[in-house]
Image: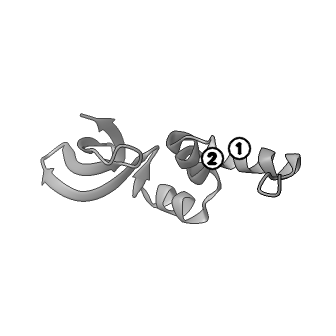
Amino acid sequence: MPDELPPSNQKNLLSKSSISIYEKTQQQLQNDKKWQHETSLGKRVALYKIQNELGRGNFSTVKMAIHEVTKDPTSTLWYNLLSNPVNTLV
């Protein structure tokens, strides 16, 4: 049949289409220079992209984060202890 692909092309097509959104996001997290740069600047934690500050107190800061796969917003709590911020998902 003329519309069938050779086995090597079928394998490549299957491997590209069978990757899940989560796996694609994990690959971007590991290989994409922009993602690595954002992580080093504290604008990204794992699969969450840090957006804006929601509130600030004496010992912590609350920031909004968006999950890359589900696009769900969540709040993150950043503790300011000994000038070393610690991140906790709330």
Q: Residue at x 63, y 47 (%)?
A: 17
Check whether the beta carbons of the residues at disc 2 and disc 1 lie within 8 A of each other.
yes
Decide: is 66 above or below 18. Answer: below
User: Is residue 23 shown to the viewer in this render?
Assistant: yes
Q: Is residue 35 left or right of residue 6?
A: left
User: Which of the two residues, 7 or 61, is positioned nearer the viewer here?
Assistant: 7
Q: Residue 83: which disc?
A: none
Q: Residue furthest front?
A: 1
User: Is residue 83 shown to the viewer in this render?
Assistant: no
Q: Position of residue 43 (x, y in %)?
A: 39, 58
| Residue on which disc 2 sits | 17
Please tell me whether mark 2 sits on a helix, a strand or a loop: helix
Q: Residue at x 21, y 44 (%)?
A: 60
Q: Residue 14: which disc?
A: 1
Q: Position of residue 24 (x, y in %)?
A: 57, 47
Between the residue at mark 2 and the residue at mark 1, the CA separation in whole angstroms equals: 5 Å
Please tell me whether mark 1 sits on a helix, a strand or a loop: helix
Q: Which kind of residue does numbered mark 1 sit on?
A: Leu
Q: Residue at x 49, y 55 (%)?
A: 39
Decide: is 54 above or below 21. Answer: below
